[in-house]
Image (cartoon, rainbow, N blue to C red):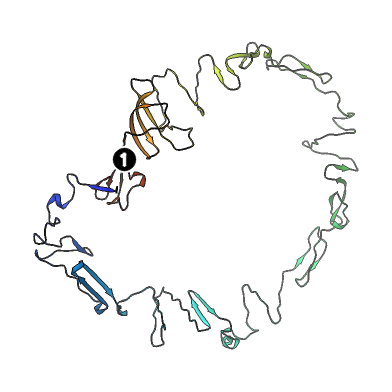
Amino acid sequence: MATWKKVAVSGSNISQFNNDAGYLTSEVAQHAFTTASINGVDLLADDSQGKFNIVTGSLGTGLTITGTPGTDTITFDLSNVPNSSLTNSSIYISGSGISNEGSVALGATASIDVQVDDSTIEISGDQLQIKDGGIGTTQIADSLGTIGENSFTGSFSGSFTGDVTIDLVDLSEGTGIVPFTYDGNSTTTVAISGAAALTDNIITKWDATDGKFVDSSLTDNGTTITGTTSIQLTGASSNLSGSFSGSFEGDGSGLTGVGSLANALTDTAGGGLTDFSFDGSSAVNIAVSGAADLSNNTVVKWDNTANKFANTIATDNGSAFTITGNSLITGDLTVQGTASFQHNEELQVADRFVLFASGSNTTGDGGIVVQQGTQNIGELFAYDSATTRWGLTSSFDASNTAYTPDAFIAAVSTLASTDPNTTGPDSRYDAVGNIYVSSGDESIWIYS
């Protein structure tokens, strides 16, 4: 089974290399328990025949230790523990529980959960619960005082017996509301003043004299607002849009429908339009200056000398943009499609990271091919998605979409753990030939 295996190198702190006291060659050659330690205290035998003895301590007869030579086993049995030896944050008592001959003492921040199944009272956590019929009024009279002379605050639910007096804050009508009174003892309806007299679809207005809403002279049937009197707009920014009929006063005095225009429409000199004039009395065609001389699909530029558009060296046929001469780009150039370069002898990339296979939406292989004697054939350094490792191969055809590595690149990982089999690097690095170096004890491991 492949695992991380520790590598012994020159300078490793291994007793076999140093031939020190930690290297136990036989029981009689040196002290037998030089590597044993309990609570930070090293156990060193006082001679070559020293024995490691285990004895019971202050727990007395409650702890039994048994050694079995045949299986080299030490067995610890704990039958009981004296209460004087305990300091507990919690205790569970089964069976008959605690009698009135004993007691339970709690610390200042401690708590106790008690449940007495045959009683009418239960104590659980921080709640005192009383079962149905557990306590009558005679038992709580002295605690609550005289019924009828005490008051309670908070939220209550259920039914009450006796007189209840509730003093609500007065509620009265304001402007535009029909007068009403409300004392909390009976239902009251609140209505808008004048609403009952309003006509359907009539736009209302406020009558300050009578203090209510009344009908106006405008109606709205959902599609048209109609006025039975004149409509006047005031203010410089007041406008109406839509279709109008009838007569108008003011700037449109005497107009019914479309009439002549007050101002003529003409071209601007040098503005790129052919000469024209328009007074609203006849139709006029407006043309772009130079449009008749332009070639189909040619991207145009403005000729300030001739005051018209002229052809450029660029064309756009709807699928390709072609420039027949040199191009100079002074800003950034972003290519979101496929970029092809010809006759390029030296490639300089300013980006710190280069993305390959950017058009892929699935996992796959990819890498760099260095061509040798044959076109498109060379040495490959690439990522193998099947093994999630980087590898090498030779005589690789750059037109292929996958490859099989001849060899892998070893990865080196490091953590504080002194045993990568217990707490190691990401599982993807559990691959043959990879190396792990502990930053804790500087041990070296190889996966095999």
Q: Quadrant of residue 81?
A: bottom left
Q: Horizontal and vertical percent for residue 314?
A: 57, 16
- Residue 107 in the image: x percent, y percent? 39, 76
* Quadrant assignment, res 39: bottom left
Viewport quadrant of the C terminus: top left
Where residue 312 appears, as percent x and y from the top left, is 58, 14
Foreground of the two, 361 or 240: 361
Q: Which residue is mark 1?
A: 411
Query: How many numbered marks does the figure carry?
Result: 1
Figure check: 113 above or below 192 = below
Seen at 26% across and 76% down, the residue is 63
- Judged from the image, the secondary structure of the residue bearing numbered disc 1 is loop
Residue 362 relative to residue 180: left or right = left
Image position of 14 (left or right of 119) = left
Res 179 seen here: yes
Counting from the top left corner in percent of width and height, residue 442 is at 24, 47
View extreme (front): residue: 70
Q: Is residue 194 visible?
A: no
